[in-house]
Image (cartoon, coloured by chain):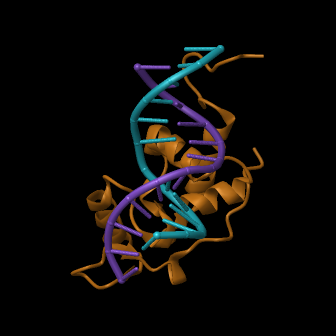
Chain colours: A orange, B cyan, C purple
Amino acid sequence: MVTDATGFGPPSEFADDVLEVVDQIPEGMVMTYGDIAEVLGRGGPRGVGSVMARYGSDVPWWRVLRSGGWFPQGLEDEALAHYREEGTPLVGGALDGRRVDLAVARWKDARRPTA
DNA sequence: GGATTGACCGGAA
DNA sequence: GTTCCGGCCAATC
């Protein structure tokens, strides 16, 4: 079997699954790293974050956040801009608005990639 | 092949 | 309520 995708293509089946789930998140909805890991039934919050950090460029990474609804570290400003643009429900208000309202924006209907 | 880092989570002090 | 610690998994050097 091809030990590695030389040239181009999914770096690993795991990363492909993570990107697939994130790509399923509709506008105005968000998921936490732990939720994605749970949906996949594999890996962990670190595994998803690691893959996202390298290949998240191909998916709406701003719809993925940490537990509690906090934005990813280092991209709070970028994520916040996307949320305001998509109308994602924030908590605290425009002044604080540094957190997402998981009570309304938490996407749980994501399904495992059948690919 | 091994060791370190990284967009994390949860519990305890 | 906030802060610190260890544990977890995958990718990269």
Image height of C9 relative to A39, above or below:
above
**Which of B8 and A111 lies nearest the eye of the viewer?**
B8
Task: Identify the residue shown where x is 64% and y is 32%.
Answer: A12
Whether residue A94 is visible to the viewer of this picture, yes or no, is yes
Specify whether B9 is left or right of A77: right
Query: Percent from the top left, x then y, of residue A111?
Result: 72, 60
Task: Identify the residue shown where x is 28% and y is 65%.
Answer: A81
Residue A90 position by quadrant? bottom left
Query: Percent from the top left, x then y, of residue A85?
Result: 32, 69
Residue A37 position by quadrant? bottom right
Specify whether A29 is left or right of A111: left
Report how many numbered discs are placed on residues in the image: 0
Image height of A102 relative to A51, above or below:
below
Specify whether A58 is left or right of B5: right
Query: Percent from the top left, x then y, of residue A86?
Result: 38, 70
Looking at the figure, which quarter contains the N terminus of chain A? top right
Looking at the figure, which quarter contains the C terminus of chain A? top right
Image height of A80 relative to A103, above or below:
above
Whether residue A60 is visible to the viewer of this picture, yes or no, is no
Specify whether A81 is left or right of A37: left
Query: Percent from the top left, x then y, of residue A32?
Result: 54, 63
Task: Identify the residue shown where x is 74% and y is 54%.
Answer: A41
